[in-house]
Amino acid sequence: MVAHRRAWRGSCGSGRPEAIARLRPTTVSAPRCRQRRAAGRLPPRNAQCEERGRGLPQPDGRVDGALPTTGLDVSPGPLLLSTTLGLSAPALLASLEGSTSSLQTALALGLVVTVHECGHFAAARLQNIHVSKFSVGFGPCVLRYQGPKVEYSLRLFPFGGFVAFPEEKGDLDPDAVREYPEDDPDLLNNRPIKDRFLVISAGVVANMVMAFGILWGQSLNPGLMQLTYHPGVKVPELANTSLARSSGLRVNDTILGINGEQVGEGEEAVDKVVSTIKANPRREITLDLRRSESVMSVTVTPEQASDGTGRIGIQLLANADKEVVKADGILDGAGLASRETVKLTKLVLDGFGKLLFNFQQNMDKLSGPVAIIANGAQYSRNNLYDLLQFMVIVNINLAVINTIPLPGLDGGYLALLFAETLRGGKRLPDNVESVINQSGFLLLFTLGIVLLVKDSLKLLN
């Protein structure tokens, strides 16, 4: 995230107290208004304080298909989006088992956010653009260091961050001292569109580079996991008292068909079984199974969950053989990593496409920070390889989410730059930009509250 300096004055114990998403009307001169929009048009005109988090994912394992991959935006409002990734990942267990694994997950998320913000920061400094603040995390300040020109801070929650740029007159107070001359060529606001574009888009680029780098390293040692899909859906886990178990399903069964129809293979097969179960609460369904060398059928009546959907207490994964492919040298590893990065990015884009064009059916695929930490903790409990895979997923999801032209995301700011280009370098009116930004932040905040409650209830259940 990029932001102007005044929006964060008082954070970490200096200046006015921090007030997240507290809004008050202000009267701002045109030059100040322009500079407040300098950071890729981030803040609305009357925002006292703003923070954003980043899109974060979950692996594809599901409990009754209820917990898919997610993305995250936090304060003034989280935007939690999801995709189906199809990775060779462990099924998501909706529980926080072990403080150590949860801490490892928080550190991994913090590292991904740091890389994203370093992208913004590096792009600005390499162009000699003034930067006033660099922060990782949101919420209460844990550590703060005031450098010669930049204030660096670490905050409690690892789901967000920001890079702040100084404005022309330092603050909105009448007696404020101008930090830089209004016509300083190194103020972001005074740079051409292409320079601002580089600053805003650099976070996305940094995340993609990190994902590629992790995959490149894994391709050399121990190798990249490759999947070969087969018909059916595997059952890796059953709840001890689940309807699925009492109806005759067992761990390692393969579901071949549901209600007389073949489920197919891959992630689409998982989606088909999940959607059928969820769409039939209190209605009997028939599952065609393969157990070892035997083929059989069982019937089960999903119970109705608190959200009105059906569930039977089962985890599902695509039926696939796993093969570890190790690169023959650095160049071969770069090729393997490139292909894997492209493949995963396509899967993420496909997941977001399904969410966009069929939101009502896929709205259950939105999850928040509680589910993300639970998911990351599961990765951490397995091994370092799986934790690194989690970081790859996080990076790619974060990059894709931040290209969405939605207010509050990097893509929203890029869209405003594009509009400025179409208008021959003339910016949108202040009131229009204010409405756009405030509506976006309100949407993010509302989604965040709803999904935080939803995730918490899932864990409690």
Image (cartoon, helix red, strand yellow):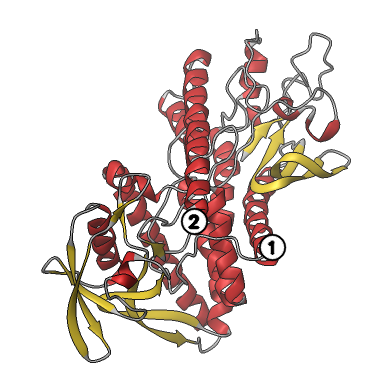
Residue with the mark numbered 1: 99
Other residues around mark 1 within 10 Å, as few (<14) / some (14–19) / many (≥20): few
Q: Which structural element holds mark 1?
A: helix
Check residue 143 in the rendering and tell me which mark sits there, or answer none: none
Q: Which quadrant would residue 405 be assigned to in this image?
A: top left
Considering only vertical position in the picture, is 201 above or below 303?
Answer: above
Q: Earlier in the sequence, mark 2 or mark 1?
A: 2
Q: Is any part of residue 208 visible from this angle?
A: no
Residue with the mark numbered 2: 57
Q: Where is residue 167 in the image (x, y as percent from the top left)?
A: 72, 24
Q: Camera-side residue: 354 or 435?
A: 354
Name the residue located 29 percent from the left edge and 66 percent from the top edge.
270
Number of marks drawn: 2
**For residue 252, side relative to residue 368 (left or right):** left
Name the residue located 31 percent from the left edge and 45 percent from the top edge.
308
**For residue 319, side relative to residue 299 (left or right):** right
Q: Where is residue 145 in the image (x, y as percent from the top left)?
A: 87, 44
Amino acid identity at mark 2? Pro
**For residue 25, side relative to residue 269 (left or right):** right
Q: Camera-side residue: 255 or 270?
A: 255
Q: Which structural element holds mark 2?
A: loop
Other residues around mark 2 within 10 Å, as few (<14) / some (14–19) / many (≥20): many
Name the residue located 49 percent from the left edge and 40 percent from the top edge.
79
Q: Residue furthest left?
A: 260
Q: Position of residue 294 (x, y in %)?
A: 20, 89
Name the residue located 30 percent from the left edge and 49 percent from the top edge.
309
Q: Is any part of residue 243 visible from this angle?
A: yes
Amino acid identity at mark 1? Ser
